[in-house]
Image (spheres, coloured by chain):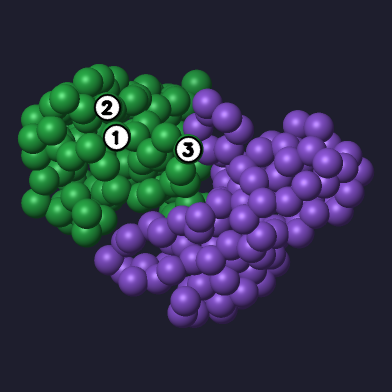
Amino acid sequence: DIQLTQSPSSLSASVGDRVTITCRASQTISSYLNWYQQKPGKAPKLLIYAASSLQSGVPSRFSGSGSGTDFTLTISSLQPEDFATYYCQQSYSAPPERTFGQGTKVEIK
Amino acid sequence: EVQLVESGGGLAQPGGSLRLSCAASGFTFSSYEMNWVRQAPGKGLEWVSYSYSSGSPKYYVDSVKGRFTISRDNAKNSLYLQMNSLRAEDTAVYYCARENLSTGDAFDIWGEGTMVTVSS
């Protein structure tokens, strides 16, 4: 089974800060890595797919990079609406076991 | 509008059963793989089950194998999760999610979720 480890588990940041979240896979997953944002009481929302492709309608301050086992989600200038929990997910496995990372909570400093 | 709407959650006793439904609209349901994902209170997301577009094959996380069954009715644009032998640790919000090949098999559409509570 492929395990995903996110770091940090939580972080405090201010509006306008550059924020970086990392996700490490236990084995290579090529570029089959996705990022989601979840706000309290709401369903997750797809932000980035295939490691670096921005989902339609998602602001360009979000970006993703990486391949193989190490991946990064970057928010270039944190906005008030970005305070949320972020999850990575792999879609590489066959048979399909769509593992999620444990999440990173972005809080207001 | 592309939409997924879950229903069927509620309170069940340990060892009991529930059947969740997910109604799809606004897209060709029969063309997409579908998944169930759950989130226990205060915890992260956990993938639960996958259904190929035709209904087979199906896959499950180890913790629900033999107890949960995913199914779909493409004529009714609906996905289901039959949950038997429920345990306290199955308490969670259950989401259905569309898997999209054009987004690298990411989950691009999610329902709002339905709460399942397992307690005596």
Disc on res. B117 = 2
- Tell me the residue at 64%/63% (across/down): A7
Residue B62 in the image: x percent, y percent? 22, 59
Question: Is A45 left or right of A18, judged from the image as shown?
Answer: left
Q: CA distance from mark 3 to mark 2?
A: 14 Å
Residue B36 in the image: x percent, y percent? 32, 41
Q: CA distance from mark 1 to mark 3?
A: 11 Å
From this view, report whether residue A25 is shown above or below residue B24. below
From this view, report whether residue A66 is shown above or below residue B86. below
Q: Earlier in the sequence, mark 2 or mark 1?
A: 1
Mark 3 falls within which chain?
B
Q: Earlier in the sequence, mark 3 or mark 2?
A: 3
Type of residue at label 2?
A: Thr
Type of residue at label 3?
A: Gly
Asked whether disc 2 touches disc 1, contact meaning CB atoms under 8 Å apart, the reply is yes
Question: Is A97 left or right of A103, judged from the image as shown?
Answer: left
Disc on res. B42 = 3
In this orientation, does residue B88 appear? Answer: yes
Mark 1 falls within which chain?
B
Instruction: Read off the residue under disc 1.
Output: B91
Residue B120 in the image: x percent, y percent? 16, 25
Marks 1 and 3 on same chain = yes
- Chain B colour? green
Q: Earlier in the sequence, mark 1 or mark 3?
A: 3
From this view, report whether residue A87 is shown above or below residue B17. below
User: Element at badge 3?
Assistant: loop
- Chain A colour? purple
Mark 2 falls within which chain?
B
